[in-house]
Image (cartoon, helix red, strand yellow):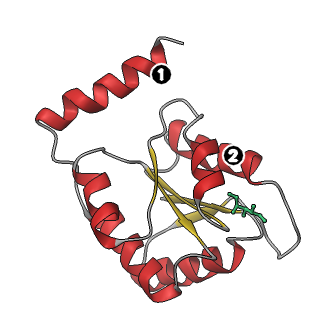
Amino acid sequence: MIALGADHGGYELKEAIKKHLEHRGIEYVDCGTYSHESVDYAPIAQKTCEKVTSGKCEKAILCCGTGIGISMAANKVKGIRAACCSDYFSAKYTRLHNDANALCMGGRVVGTGLAMELVDVFLDTEFEGGRHQRRVDQITAIENSK
Ligand code: RB5
């Protein structure tokens, strides 16, 4: 199960991702927004990411205009490692090396075709572990020191 969230800047991209996931037979929960009307991205990031930290969803995909604001908000949710990506290599390696559990994209940055490639590689790539586990643990240690 994948958690989806977007503000108005990412709304259309989220809708395209829903169709793509349906085509792939992947279940999702849509945490909004549900129209083009202007909304704030931080509460949507929190609601969407909490689907992951609660265990209901394996990963989150978040969209705003740039992908940046919603990724900043997502990374404030304990247990979330969100990566804002607009290229294939980053979307792949943030899974391999960072065990990212949230992919963020900008609806005003990436085209639909590229975005679906990013979604696919993000969902289909496993974390490598090994030395990268130590580094992810160090990120978690910073989070836990607050
Ligand atoms: C909304 O206009 C826009 O600021 C938002 O979608 C996002 O790009 C923020 O980072």
- Residue 17: image quadrant is bottom right
Amino acid carrying label 2: it is: Lys
**What is the x, y in percent for residue 95?**
29, 53
* Among the two numbered marks 1 and 2 on one chain, the one whose residue lies closer to the N terminus: 2
Label 2: element kind: helix
* Pointer 2 local density, CA inside 10 Å: few below 14, some 14–19, many at least 20: some
Residue that lies at the very extreme toward the top in this rendered image: 145
- Residue 108: image quadrant is bottom right
What residue is shown at x 30% (from left), y 44% (from top)?
A: 98
Amino acid carrying label 1: it is: Glu
The answer to whether mark 1 is within 8 Å of ligand 1 is no
The answer to whether mark 2 is within 8 Å of ligand 1 is no
Q: Is residue 38 above or below residue 15?
A: above
**Between 89 and 129, the one nearer to me in the picture:** 89
Residue that lies at the very extreme toward the left in this rendered image: 130
Q: Depth-wise, is mark 1 or mark 2 nearer the camera? A: 1
Checking the image for residue 41, the label placed there is: none
Q: Quadrant of ligand 1?
A: bottom right
Do the residues bearing badges 1 and 2 touch, measured as CB atoms within 8 Å? no
Q: Is residue 32 above or below residue 113?
A: above
**What is the x, y in percent for residue 126?**
22, 55
Label 1: element kind: helix
What residue is shown at x 58% (from left), y 83% (from top)?
A: 16
**What is the x, y in percent for residue 49?**
58, 45
Residue at image mark 1: 143
Residue at image mark 2: 47
Q: CA distance from mark 1 to mark 2?
A: 19 Å
What residue is shown at x 58% (from left), y 34% (from top)?
A: 77
* Pointer 1 local density, CA inside 10 Å: few below 14, some 14–19, many at least 20: few
What residue is shown at x 42% (from left), y 48% (from top)?
A: 101
